[in-house]
Amino acid sequence: MSSPVYELRIALEHISPAIWRDFRVSAGMSLEELHEVILAVMGWEGGHLYLFRKDNTIYANALLRDVWNPPLAEKTMLADLLEKPGDEMGYVYDLGDDWHHRITLRRILPPSEKAPVCLDGERACPPEDSGGPPGYYDILAVLAGNGPEHRQEILDWLEEDYDPEAFSVDHVNARLDQLVSGTKGSPNSIAAVVTEFLDHEEKRVSRNTHRKYEQALDMLTYAINVYGGGDAGLPSASLMRGDRDFIEVAEMDALFEYLPEFFGYFLPRKMFATEQQMIDVRATLRRLVAWMAETGRMDGDDATHWRQYIRDKVAEGMEATRLRWHDFTELPPPLPEGEVEEMIEDHFTVTHVKPGKLWVDHPEDPSRLLALEVTRELSSLCTEGMELGLALVKIRGEWYLEEVYNAYPY
């Protein structure tokens, strides 16, 4: 039996004038599929994590399993959460900028109605990575000729043709048509080879091991799609919703080109990977390389090189994990009394170490170093070149350490 069609309204919260869309989807789709439709309908690029919230329950994908262990969006149907007109739920896109949306079920229609389709809406989606509602309001102020002190920086960053009032239902529906008719990519693409590998291993390993393989490769392919530019030499903004994913176009060489970024940036800095996740990644990728050699997709010498490389890099990542999750229970030296004039949370490179003291790049003057009083426990863990995530506060014109929230090799 076909599922009914839901007519929904989605609106960004904490934004005025309102940014909203009316659209129709099948009630039988999963929340993961609904997420893809929302990206197309709203105009988001799709390069960030997301979650749905209904009452006090969060629904997300497997990448957040080790953070909240939520019910999986891919296994939760839209009809399970919205049942009658007036029912609502939340959707959050980009867990850094925190774009909160409110989704409301407006009508329930027969299965014969076209879906997905956008019906109406107002105003353009905010620019990606603009800093949430506060950053968006700064952009509006700059476009109105006012704006904060860093208005030139905003203008340099902003796309020249960005019009906050622009909206085209035809453009949205073109994206939805591309989403529905998107092709699977070449048989030698990352996506195709990974799928074939997982299908092969499903017949060979236990269900638990296969699940670990899936989770590790989900993290890797997600990382390549979203962060596949920059130093890895891959195209930037590679995740193009409404078009094919980068992993459906790129061949396996791109996967291996991205591994340094994956081990050095994505796992420790974006995923806060646990030691067990590192172990699972190591086992998965080493087995993937062995399978590629067995099936003639990779030369034997290359396979030996990559298996060794994966082992070494995961060992470095595990060391970073142990440092990052080290329990810094001993507090920094007490702060002097006085009004906090400024606070900075950022990553700093350790330049020099002595017992109970660290030198890092000065937050205001790159030609100087900042000496910080720290616990001996922390200084004993640190080496020159290590990066620390620090909260620094300025009191009476001097900078002091308030908190250490991250630590890993540079």
Image (cartoon, rainbow, N blue to C red):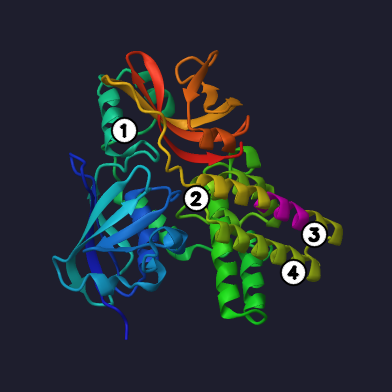
Answer with left or right where residue 264 lies relative to residue 152: right
> In the rendered structure, which disc, 1 or 3, sits on the residue that comes first in sequence?
1
Three-letter code for the amino acid on which mark 1 is drawn: Gly
Q: Which residues are magenta?
A: 306-314
- Name the residue that disc number 3 marks: 303
- Above or below, 362 against 106 in this view is above
Disc number for residue 135:
1
> In the rendered structure, which disc, 2 or 3, sits on the residue that comes first in sequence?
2
Give the distance between the C-alpha atoms of the residues marked 3 and 4, in whole angstroms.
9 Å
Give the distance between the C-alpha atoms of the residues marked 2 and 3, in whole angstroms.
28 Å
Three-letter code for the amino acid on which mark 2 is drawn: Phe
- Where's residue 375, x and y in %? 48, 32
- Name the residue that disc number 4 marks: 291
Majority secondary structure of magenta residues: helix
Three-letter code for the amino acid on which mark 3 is drawn: Ala
- Where's residue 152, x and y in %? 38, 19
Give the distance between the C-alpha atoms of the residues marked 1 and 2, in whole angstroms.
26 Å
> In the rendered structure, which disc, 4 or 2, sits on the residue that comes first in sequence?
2
Mark 2 residue crowding within 10 angstroms, few (<14) / some (14–19) / many (20+): some
Task: Residue at the far right: name it.
Answer: 301
> In the rendered structure, which disc, 4 or 1, sits on the residue that comes first in sequence?
1
Q: Which residue does the image show at 23% across and 77% down from the upper left?
A: 110
- Name the residue that disc number 2 marks: 272
- Where's residue 62, x and y in %? 45, 64
**Residue 307 in magenta stretch:** yes
Q: Which residue does the image show at 64% across and 42% down from the upper left?
A: 232
Q: Which residue does the image show at 47% across and 64% down from the upper left?
A: 181
Write down the quadrant of residue 343 in the picture: top left
Mark 4 or mark 2, whichever is nearer to me: 2
Q: Quadrant of the C terminus?
A: top right
- Above or below, 388 against 285 in this view is above
Q: Identify the secondary structure beneath mark 2.
A: loop
